[in-house]
Amino acid sequence: MNRVAWAPFLVSAVLLPAGACTSERPGTAASNVGAPASGPGTLPPVGLPDLSPMEAPVRQQMAERQQALEALVAAPGTPAAALARAYGEVGSLLMAADYFEAAEPYLLHAQALAPDQMRWPYYLGHAYMATDATAKAATSFQQVLRLQPGDLATLVWLGNLYLDQGELPLAESSFSQALAIQPRLVAALFGLGRVSLARREFARAVDQLEQMLAADPRASMAHYPLALAYRGLGDTAKAEAHLRRRGGVEVGPPDPLMVELRGLLRGAIAEEARGVRALDSGDFRAAVESFRRAVALAPKNPSLHHKLGTALSLAGDPGGAVEAFQEAVRLSPDFSQAHYSLGVLAAARGRHGEAVERLSTAVRYQPDYIEARLQLADALRQVGQMERSLGQYRDVLAIDPRVSDARFGYAMTLLVLRRYPEARDSLREAVRLHPDQLRFAEELAKLDAALPAGR
């Protein structure tokens, strides 16, 4: 979950009436409704964070739920279940807005008032994960499993926590239980594969991670640990292939409670967040729908048009993507990422001259834009401008000498120009710097076979 960099703190009296929702008032009200002995009176005080950075619809939504909670707290004899729900609703909204620390006390009050409800410890577990409080997160998820044994999402998240803490037997047990409930569950196979990798059981890790990719080829996050497993087995060719395909598509279990949480907020920022999460999970059509709603709410935001174009491109609508990227450029002519995206689409359609123009513009507005320079270098090669292409590869390596694609492109361009001694030197240096990438050694071997040293 992406975090919004808004630090929560107690809101001013303008937004939160004096004395409202402090620890004393919820404690008093809860004691009248049979709260547990260790209930809200011993819990931290609740309070909304600063709402000013939020969009107006979200501010209104937060204020409405807070006011409803205050009314229930003030009313004598309010049932515990109603209070729990009201605390939980405010906490859930704060969670949805990525205000995890502010959400925690609300969710703790809800959990104390409704100890038989698994929703509140479940959301607490995610809040603690988001703030790196892993021990508290594990405790919360363990409580969920006591209330609802065999909850699939909880087993996976708890397994991930155990794995991060090095508790391999506990992690294996959690993932195995999840697989027993839903065979071929991608998130559980991923977890088991990482457990096996941590134990250096490379063959087993390969089997589990290959099963995962067979079940969902979009789960690109599996390629990196799979590459490590193949390397552990000594299969460098497969390790290299998977390293090239590694990606960031997250692997999570079916999670209806978190899906529900993410649908709570109103406004363009909320729709943008939903779109980003859909992109990360590979649900490109859902991302398009969310970004379209965001654009409708904030039509003058160029970043939203760019995100919509990205989702349309990934969903297989390049024409719609071009329109969205062009609108982003119209709204913000120096938006280098939009120029880059238009250049990539132009190159994909064989319009290499247009690609050069767009990518050159992206680099002009953002000189350290490595991806744009790499694409520009490739496009220049396509239109026969080899010397300019070499210059772009050199510029990339000046920004970051670790970019292996720039070294490879540079060497290949030298070969096209028949500058063989320079190409040989470049490939030898690349072999030294990137010994795990076979493509450099293979090209060097081809060159040495075709042209003996000294030619």
Image: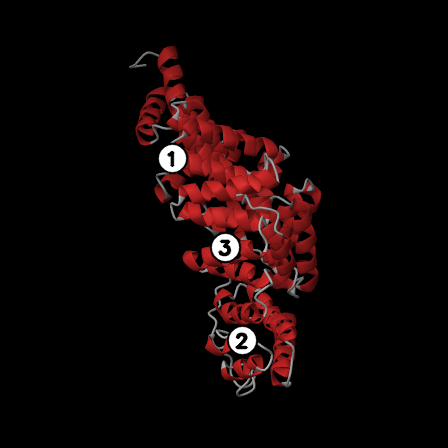
User: Which mark is drawn over residue 311?
Assistant: none
Q: Which residue is mark 1?
A: 199
The image shows residue 259 at horizontal and vertical percentages of: 63, 55
The image shows residue 402 at horizontal and vertical percentages of: 36, 38
Q: How is the image coloured?
A: secondary structure
The reply, left or right, for residue 419 in relation to residue 245 is: left
How many residues crowd around disc 3 within 10 Å: few (fewer than 14), some, or many (20 or more)?
some
Q: Which residue is mark 3?
A: 142
How many residues crowd around disc 2 within 10 Å: few (fewer than 14), some, or many (20 or more)?
many
* Residue situated in front as seen by the camera: 127 or 359: 127
Work out whether 234 lies above or below 268: above
Q: Which residue is mark 2?
A: 48
* Residue situated in front as seen by the camera: 349 or 428: 428
Q: Earlier in the sequence, mark 1 or mark 2?
A: 2
Work out whether 429 lies above or below 219: above
The image shows residue 114 at horizontal and vertical percentages of: 59, 68
Asked if one can make out residue 327 in the rendered structure from this viewpoint, the answer is: yes
Q: The residue under label 1 is which amino acid type?
A: Arg
Mark closer to the observer (1, 2)? 1
Mark closer to the observer (3, 1)? 3
